[in-house]
Each structure stands twice: as structure tokens, then as C-alpha cells.
Image (tube, rainbow, N blue to C red):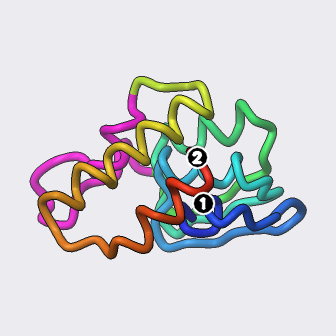
């Protein structure tokens, strides 16, 4: 979603479905104008955020939080927005987290450039 949002894609009126929907994804769906969301697994924080923004949503399983890939902690994207409710502040936090993770891993430079173009 960061890629679509960063490229300025107009997704207003579209629905989204994903295997895992956490608060970070929910914030991006709201920012993109998505009108309905389904997650096979959805965090309570994502459900609450979508509800607060009047986005109809459903899930197969509701979970307390989204866990990282190694299963030993909360997802880093979730942690980045855990205490943020403002959409723009959340987007900035996600953007910064991607840049931070890029220093640790090999996130393609083009993803960072697209986000910088969109966000400044």
C-alpha cells in the first residue's frame, strides 16, 4: 500500500482484501480512500481504526496484535503506529520506519524514492 499511496494512485471507491490487516495497513487504506476492507487476520487496533473512520470491514480472525515474521515480537510497522491516531503522523512514522529498516535490510531504493516524491 505504501507503493500505491506513494505513487499517488487514486483508490477511492475500491475495496481491499489481504491476508493480514494491522493498524499500519488500516491507516494506509484510509489514506488511499479504500471504501471497504477484509482481512483473513485483522488486529483489534486495525478494526478500531477502520471503525473510527467509518470504513466497513470484516475478518476471519480478530487478533490482539500482528506479530513479526520471526514470531517473537510485534510487527515493526504495527509498533511504528501503535500510539498514533493522526493519519498524516502515521504515514510519516511508516515512511521513517521503512527508511530505518532499509538501512538494516535490502529494501529497494525505488520504493524510498517513490515515497519521497509523494511525501516530500
- Residue 30 located left or right of residue 114: right
Image point (55%, 68%), residue name: 3
Q: Nearer the viewer, residue 6 or 94?
A: 6
Instruction: Mark 2 and mark 1 in contact? Answer it, CB < 8 Å.
Output: yes
Q: Quadrant of the C terminus?
A: top right
Residue visible at 15% across and 48% down? 73
Disc 2: CA contacts within 10 A as few (<14), some (14-19) or many (>=20): some
Give the quadrant of residue 87.
top right
| Total numbered badges shown on the rendered structure | 2
Q: 19 left or right of 102?
A: right
Residue under pointer 2: 119
Which stretch appears magenta?
Answer: 63-82
- Occupied quadrant, residue 7: bottom right
Disc ID at residue 111: none
Mark carried by residue 6: 1
Magenta region includes residue 1: no
- Relative to 91, say whether 17 is above or below: below
The prevailing secondary structure element of the residues shown in magenta is loop
Mark 2 / mark 1, whichever is N-terminal: 1
Residue 50: x %, y % from top left: 67, 42
Q: Residue at x 54, y 44 (%)?
A: 46
Instruction: Residue 105: give x, y in percent of width and height.
Output: 16, 67
Left or right: residue 30 compared with residue 81: right
Residue drawn at x 26%, y 54% as measured from the top left: 67
How packed mark 1 is, by other alpha carbons closer than 10 Å (few <14, some 14-19, many 20 or more), is: some
Amino acid at each position: 500500500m505504501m507503493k500505491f499511496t506513494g505513487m499517488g494512485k487514486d483508490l477511492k471507491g475500491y475495496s481491499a482484501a489481504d491476508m493480514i490487516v494491522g493498524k499500519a495497513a488500516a491507516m494506509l487504506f484510509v489514506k488511499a480512500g479504500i471504501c471497504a476492507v477484509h482481512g483473513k487476520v485483522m488486529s483489534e487496533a486495525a478494526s478500531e481504526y477502520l471503525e473510527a473512520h467509518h470504513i466497513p470491514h470484516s475478518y476471519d480472525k480478530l487478533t490482539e496484535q500482528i506479530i513479526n515474521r520471526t514470531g517473537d515480537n510485534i510487527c515493526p510497522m504495527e509498533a511504528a503506529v501503535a500510539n498514533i491516531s493522526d493519519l498524516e503522523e502515521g504515514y510519516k512514522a511508516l515512511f521513517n520506519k521503512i527508511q530505518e529498516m532499509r538501512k538494516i535490510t535490502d529494501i529497494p531504493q525505488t520504493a524510498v524514492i517513490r515515497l519521497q516524491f509523494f511525501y516530500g
